[in-house]
């Protein structure tokens, strides 16, 4: 079973991306599950390495790193925000809309946050 998570929201300000990453992490630990995460729009900032957040607050970069499965970011969205591939957390990479379309067609479930 393959589940695709599509995140659109910034890492902070709402808890949508946070909750999606939490769910992806738990689902990835479930037997027989394949998890893919695609970050669009402001959600690409979830995968930025070196985030410094207040003590006791979640770090979206760490959560992306621990999400399990494949993590790809919209390359156009990265460019619009000045985010380079070298700035991404380990395990995250630049992706394309074509790739998102392929992942969507292949997924058993698609969850959009």
Image (cartoon, rainbow, N blue to C red):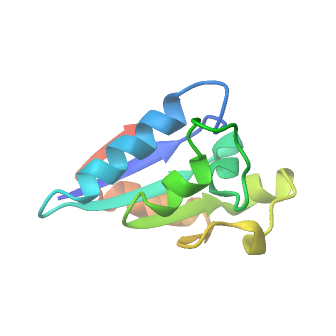
Q: How many numbered tags mark residues here? A: 0
Vertical order, 78 against 45 (above or below): below
Q: In screen coordinates, is 23 left or right of 75?
A: left
Point out the residue furthest to the front here.
Answer: 55
Image point (22%, 59%), residue name: 29
Q: Is residue 67 above or below residue 9?
A: below
The percent position of residue 94, horizontal first and vertical second, equals 65, 69
Which residue is more in the foreground, 28 or 94? Answer: 28
Q: From this viewpoint, which residue is outermost toward the left?
A: 31
Report the residue at 50% width, 52% height from top. 63
Residue at 63% across, 49% down: 46
Please tell me which residue is depicted at 39% across the width and 43% down the height of the picture.
22
Of residue 9 and residue 49, the one placed in the foreground of this image is: 49
The answer to whether residue 113 shows anywhere in this view is: no
Looking at the picture, tell me which residue is in the foreground, 33 or 30. 30
Rendered location of residue 37, percent (x, y): 45, 55
Q: Position of residue 68 (x, y in %)?
A: 37, 63
Q: What x and y, as percent, mark residue 71? A: 49, 63
The answer to which of 58 and 30 lies nearer the viewer is 58
Query: Seen in the image, is 98 located left or right of residue 76?
Result: left
Residue ranking furthest to the top: 14
Whether residue 71 is visible to the viewer of this picture, yes or no, is yes
Query: Quarter holding the N terminus?
Result: bottom left
Left or right? Give the position of 85 relative to 36: right
From the viewer's perspective, is residue 54 above or below residue 105?
A: above
Is 48 on the left or on the right of 100, as rendered? right
């Amino acid at each position: 079973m393959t589940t695709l998570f599509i995140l659109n929201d910034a890492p902070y300000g709402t808890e949508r991306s946070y909750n999606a990453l939490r769910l992806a992490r738990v689902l990835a630990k479930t037997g027989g599950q394949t998890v893919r995460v695609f970050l669009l729009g402001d959600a690409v900032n979830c995968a930025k390495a070196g985030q410094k957040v207040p003590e006791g607050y979640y770090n979206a970069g760490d959560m992306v790193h621990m999400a399990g499965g494949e993590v790809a970011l919209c390359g156009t969205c990265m460019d619009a925000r000045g985010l380079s591939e070298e700035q991404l957390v380990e395990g995250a990479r630049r992706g394309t809309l074509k790739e998102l379309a392929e992942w969507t067609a292949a997924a058993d479930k698609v969850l959009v946050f």
